[in-house]
Amino acid sequence: MVCHSYCSGRGRFFLLLLVLTMVLPAPARAAEDSAAPLIAYNALLVGDDARARLVIDFDRPPEFSYHYLKDPARLVITLPSTAFGFSGDSVEPRGLVSDVRYGATGPGQSRIVLSAREPIQMTLAEVREDTGSGARLVIDLAIAGEDSFEALLEGQRPDPGDFFSDTPQTVGEDRYVVAIDAGHGGVDTGAIGEDTKTLEKTITLDFARAFAQRLAEVPGIEPFLTRDSDTYLSLTRRVELARQHGADLFISLHADSWTSPISPARRSTRSLTGPPTGLLPPLRGARTCLTKSWA
């Protein structure tokens, strides 16, 4: 009986050692995995002069934070220690983004710095998990007004939608915002008068200013110009400015020329009930058009 009791006790002792041997290394392995650097194995930067998107694929979901800097305007994305394995050509600066830098900035920390040609606002920042191949970080940038960017610098808001988003800004319901877009501008002269050599960009800007002044006299109407100088604006930028101002209506002005006679049936102006799909957000409320006779 004594021997049986002794042998059973020794067996339990060895069994306990075996269990501890199997269980204890697991937390150590987990800690080792969490301490391993993130692997950024793929990236892509796309965009134009008004918007940009940065996409980075990681081996696992990254934790990140961000803040803004100025002179020049920059978005700084802070990550845990990261091994950047993608090609630099995939994040070549373009459009709104003038420079891209990335690398380690200290023990356990790496950063991605996106420099912009003008004030910016992050409109999207999210991690999209993929159970099969890790996770994807998606960062969207867009142009922003000077005041909005200064407010971001001052407050360093954590919510990317505080000052700018794809939804139009909220304005009083008694205000109807009209974006007046003077066609052409800068290096884009537009049509040139056959006799006077007058440039279309000059005509559209003069008319836009006069039109905005008349609209401002109408109660409840809030006009603004996408350009108020001889400046070239891309189509994307014109639309983005309209979004930022929460435009209910977008009016693009042009003064095209014809070399052939115009039939009486075409001697009229026509209005569209809305912009092409995808250019502007839906109009707020039930109002879908603005009509007024300008004598």
Image: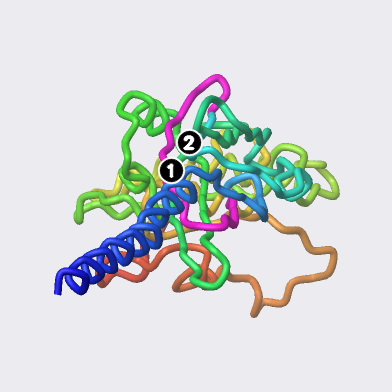
The reply to whether residue 104 is in sight is yes
Residue at which label 1 appears:
64
Q: Which label sits on residue 171?
A: none
- In this picture the colour scheme is rainbow
**Magenta span:** 53-73
Quadrant location of the C terminus in the rendered image: bottom left
- Percent position of residue 71, x then y: 55, 19
In the rendered structure, does residue 257 fall within the stretch colored magenta? no
Q: Residue furthest top?
A: 71
> What residue is shown at x 33% (from left), y 59% (from top)?
17
Q: Quadrant of residue 110?
A: top right
39 vs 78: above or below: below
Inter-mark Cα distance, 1 to 2: 5 Å
The answer to which of 17 and 229 lies nearer the viewer is 17
78 vs 49: above or below: above
Amino acid residing under circle 1: Phe
> What residue is shown at x 53% (from left), y 25% (from top)?
106
Quadrant location of the N terminus in the rendered image: bottom left
- Percent position of residue 146, x then y: 44, 29
Amino acid residing under circle 2: Thr
Residue at which label 2 appears:
78
Q: Circles 1 and 2: CB distance less than 8 Å?
A: yes
The answer to which of 124 and 8 lies nearer the viewer is 8
Q: Is residue 53 left or right of residue 10?
A: right
